[in-house]
Amino acid sequence: MPHILDAATASPAAPAATTTSADIAWGEAFCSEGANCFRFGLDDSGRAYIGSTLAPGEYVSDSVEALRALISAVKSGAADHLL
């Protein structure tokens, strides 16, 4: 199983406890060309989720703070090498 990266430190973190998708309040999906859609969600305990609409039961979960750090890093170019 691949490691989930902690966005704040870019080091491997333990996978989060499994939560059923019914417990997650998903926002509207963000889609790019070719219908590659991702969505963000929150659960009742305040954990943040990122998932693909192609695999609804699969997602990455971490704290809201870690999601903010991930988004900031992506916006500053940390993932540009993937484009």
Image (cartoon, grey):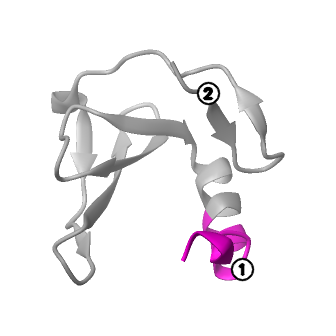
Mark 1 to mark 2 CA distance (whole Å): 22 Å
Query: Which SS class for mark 2?
Result: loop
Q: Is residue 34 above or below residue 14?
A: below
Q: Where is residue 22? Give x, y as percent.
A: 15, 30
Q: Earlier in the sequence, mark 1 or mark 2?
A: 2
Q: Nearer the viewer, residue 46 or 81?
A: 81
Q: Which residues are magenta?
A: 71-83
What residue is pinned by disc 1?
Answer: 77
Q: Is residue 74 magenta?
A: yes
Q: Amino acid at mark 1?
A: Gly
Residue plotted at (74% across, 81% down): 76
Q: Residue at x 70, y 50 (%)?
A: 7
Quadrant assignment, res 37: bottom left
Rendered image: mark on residue 3: 2
Looking at this view, is 26 or 81 the one in front? 81
For disc 2, the neighbor class at 10 Å (few under 14, some 14 to 19, many from 20) is few
Quadrant for the C terminus in the image: bottom right
Q: Is residue 54 left or right of residue 64?
A: left
Q: Is residue 37 above or below residue 61?
A: below
**Mostly what secondary structure, the magenta segment?**
helix
* Location of residue 25 in the rendering, given as x and y in whole percent from the top left corner: 24, 46
